[in-house]
């Protein structure tokens, strides 16, 4: 198998919002990934967008990372997230505490197809410049090669989760339905 060069491209949109705008490449140290997903959110409430990235890093190593935007430079938080490939991720304030939490789905093993879904609660700063993302035992269906999205489906003023993807049909958890 030929190993190609893969990377992640971050672009900033410039110009007036009323017409087509050019994109400008931004030089960044964000880890390049494939079979991947990215999502923006201001997880630290400092009024600039931060980035979550998941997917296959070099040598087929599943990864998931959060990059804090510090005045236009991205810094890897080193958060202890479970690495996945064929991934999807989304930010949403599921616990309604004012900061976005992160859901990640994907494949733990790119060779054997082991789906997983992980929800991380944003517990804020740790006092030494780091940030705490706590894994939540959510019971959400483990999927890979899918998509996730937060929204208020039932208009009850709290977030609901839509999740789609491949899962082990021999082990569906109670309360989940397969929609065909």
Image (cartoon, helix red, strand yellow):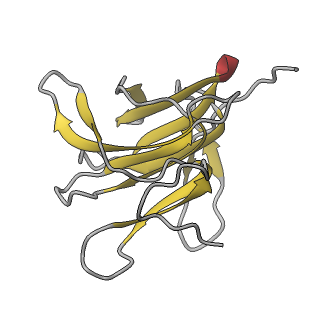
Number of marks drawn: 0
In the rendered image, the vertical position of residue 38 relative to residue 148, given as above or below: above
Residue 34: percent from the left, percent from the top?
68, 34
The residue depicted at 11 percent of the width and 26 percent of the height is: 127
Asked whether residue 49 appears in the rendered view, the answer is no
Depth order, front residue of 169/20: 169
Quarter of the image that includes the N terminus: top right
Q: Position of residue 42 (x, y in %)?
A: 32, 48
Give the residue at x 61% y 53%: 169
Q: Residue at x 51, y 68 (%)?
A: 177
Residue 8, how many percent across, how many down?
63, 35
**Image quadrant in which you'd find residue 72:** top left
Identify the residue at the far right of this view.
Answer: 1
Q: Which residue is at the far top?
A: 59
Answer above or below: position of 39 versus 77. below
Q: Position of residue 47 (x, y in %)?
A: 28, 50
Quick one: quadrant of the C terminus? bottom right
Q: Residue at x 29, y 52 (%)?
A: 100
Give left or right: position of 76 versus 167: left
Q: Residue furthest bottom?
A: 155
Most distant residue in the left direction: 127
Left or right: residue 3 compared with residue 68: right
Q: Is residue 152 visible?
A: yes
């Amino acid at each position: 198998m030929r190993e190609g060069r893969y990377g992640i491209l971050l672009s900033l949109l410039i110009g007036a919002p009323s017409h087509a705008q050019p994109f400008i490449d931004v030089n960044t140290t964000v880890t390049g990934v494939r079979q991947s997903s990215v999502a923006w959110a201001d997880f630290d409430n400092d009024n600039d967008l931060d980035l979550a990235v998941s997917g296959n890093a070099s040598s087929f190593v599943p990864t998931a990372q959060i990059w804090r935007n510090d005045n236009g430079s991205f810094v890897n938080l080193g958060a202890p997230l479970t690495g996945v490939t064929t991934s999807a991720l989304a930010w949403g304030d599921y616990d309604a505490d004012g900061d976005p939490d992160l859901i990640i789905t994907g494949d733990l093993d790119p060779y054997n197809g082991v789906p997983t879904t992980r929800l991380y609660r944003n517990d804020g700063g740790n006092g030494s410049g780091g940030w705490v993302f706590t894994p939540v035992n959510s019971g959400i269906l483990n999927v890979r090669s899918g998509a996730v999205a937060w929204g208020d489906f039932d208009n009850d003023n709290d977030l609901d989760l839509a999740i789609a993807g491949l899962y082990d049909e021999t082990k569906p958890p109670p309360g989940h339905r397969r929609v065909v």
